[in-house]
Image (cartoon, rainbow, N blue to C red):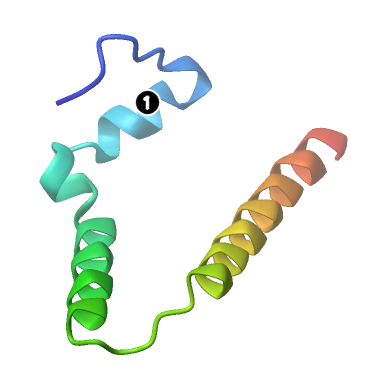
Amino acid sequence: MMSPRYQPGVYRSWFEGVYQGERESFGGAWLLGNFIEAWRGEGKPFDGGLAHDIYRTSMDFELQVFREACDG
């Protein structure tokens, strides 16, 4: 369910074009989350700090792309 506080901004047309509902649109994240939980449930090692670093690096590169687009 979409948040009642949703403010589409500049991504409105993109979001409306790809959003098919929570499960359908965010299926990859849902599958990854289930994979991680199953992995941990089997007692396999999971480095939360490393996972955080990978996520943070991804977000930093995304920010860089937006900054370069604005500077260009």
Residue shown at 71% from the left, 50% from the top = 65
Residue shown at 38% from the left, 87% from the top = 45
Quadrant position of the N terminus in the picture: top left
Q: Position of residue 16 (x, y in %)?
A: 28, 28
Give the side of residue 48 with respect to residue 20, left or right.
Answer: right
Give the side of residue 45 with respect to residue 20, left or right.
Answer: right
Dot 1 crowding, Cα within 10 Å, few <14, some 14–19, many 20+: few
Give the side of residue 65 with respect to residue 72, left or right.
Answer: left
Q: Give the residue type at disc 1.
A: Ser
Q: Nearer the viewer, residue 20 or 40?
A: 40
Q: Position of residue 52 (x, y in %)?
A: 55, 63
Q: Which residue is mark 1?
A: 13
Q: Position of residue 72 (x, y in %)?
A: 85, 40
Q: Position of residue 66 (x, y in %)?
A: 70, 41
The kind of secondary structure element at disc 1 is helix
Residue shown at 26% from the left, 78% from the top = 40
Q: Is residue 42 above or below residue 37?
A: below
Q: Residue furthest front?
A: 43
